[in-house]
Image: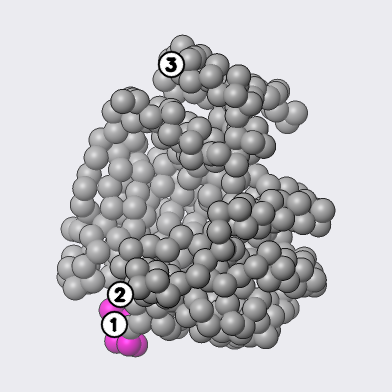
Amino acid sequence: MERTPLELYIHIPFCVRKCLYCDFLSAPGDRETKEAYMRALLAETEGRADGCREYQVTSVFVGGGTPSVVDPVWIERLLETVRRHFQVAGDAEITMEVNPGTVGPESLAAYRRAGINRLSIGLQSAREEELRALGRIHTWEQFAEAYGAAVKAGFHNINVDLMSALPGQTRGDFRETLEKVLALEPLPAHISVYSLIVEEGTPLYERQERGELILPDEDCERQMYRDTKKRLSAAGFSRYEISNYARPGYACRHNCGYWRRVDYIGLGLGAASLFRNVRFHNGRDLESYLRAPLGCREDVEVLTEAEQMEEFLFLGLRLVGGVSEERFRETFGRSLKEVYGPVIRKNRSDGLLRWRTDAADGGRYLALTERGLDLSNYVMSQFLFD
């Protein structure tokens, strides 16, 4: 029997110190709290598997926080529990986020034993003053050491996370970071580049409110975006999503599944899920989660067909390859033109959308043009029903 694909996102909310821009569900924790959390997480992982018997796990993403701040033994036990209770594909992509300064040869060897085959290392910037401005705990040298240790441990699929439009950053500053990352040996398999968003409730937001935060203007931010695309393309990376670049064969399968609305289950504090067209998430209160990790689901929302269509376009158009006309028809029983004809015609006329034929599968896809990618939020908002 062919099983339905399923992705797992596993949240470990602990970090050494919360960064100044971070509004994620994360915080430092002592050893006792971390161990209590991991025991609860193992219990939830085992319990959630009962409703997924007809599914096959095609990807696992262990994120945070900084998962590498917990004892590596817990990571081994976690992945062992996943394999024991879920049907995991033999070629599943298993990613773990790590930060420089929290990994070494022993922990990296443990992650390899656990079956992790992809690492995502949070660099953000190669410039010391920018790292300090973000509240990062590491230096470029510590990142380079962690990267080298990961390669030596046998990791070949490594993503490097970068941020642009940082406080006080110039185009030249950002190019310096790009060049240092592209000088790594071997070259990373994947690079993610996100513009800084100053979120309410963060220390950076408070500084901005006081008029103390000097950020690049919109034109400079746009130039950094274009510099990224041009430089990474010249280095052999293809942009497959608005903010993500990969060498051939290394696009992140887990994230592609998310943008294509593959079912996923979130495990851990605050983790979100999309399962059988129902969205829900775990509660954010740590004590409640520790007491009852299987009893913490909140905001269960059964998506209407209209909401499913909105997500199909809003998420799928983030992919440079676009959304499949055939898959839309198979899913909803109607064509893209029947549902969104006027929106498609308008944005094609404006040079923001295009039809393309995929060389691999011969399918027809609706995709953003280069100009459309620059104005993606504007285009995608038009696919929302009133």
Residue at image mark 1: 33
Amino acid type indicated by mark 1 = Thr
* On screen, residue 280 above or below 328: below
Element type where label 1 sits in the image: helix
Which residue bears the numbered disc 2? 37
Whole-angstrom CA distance, mark 3 to mark 2, is: 46 Å
State which mark lies toward you, 3 or 1: 3
- First in residue order: circle 3 vs circle 1: 1
In the picture, the quarter occupied by the C terminus is top left
| Residue 7 horizontal side relative to residue 240, left or right | left
Q: Position of residue 118 (x, y in %)?
A: 61, 63
Which residue is at the front of the view, 26 or 148? 26
Q: Which mark is residue 339?
A: 3
Residue that sits furthest to the front in the current view: 211
Label placed on residue 338: none
Look at the numbered disc 3 and give the secondary structure of its residue. Answer: helix
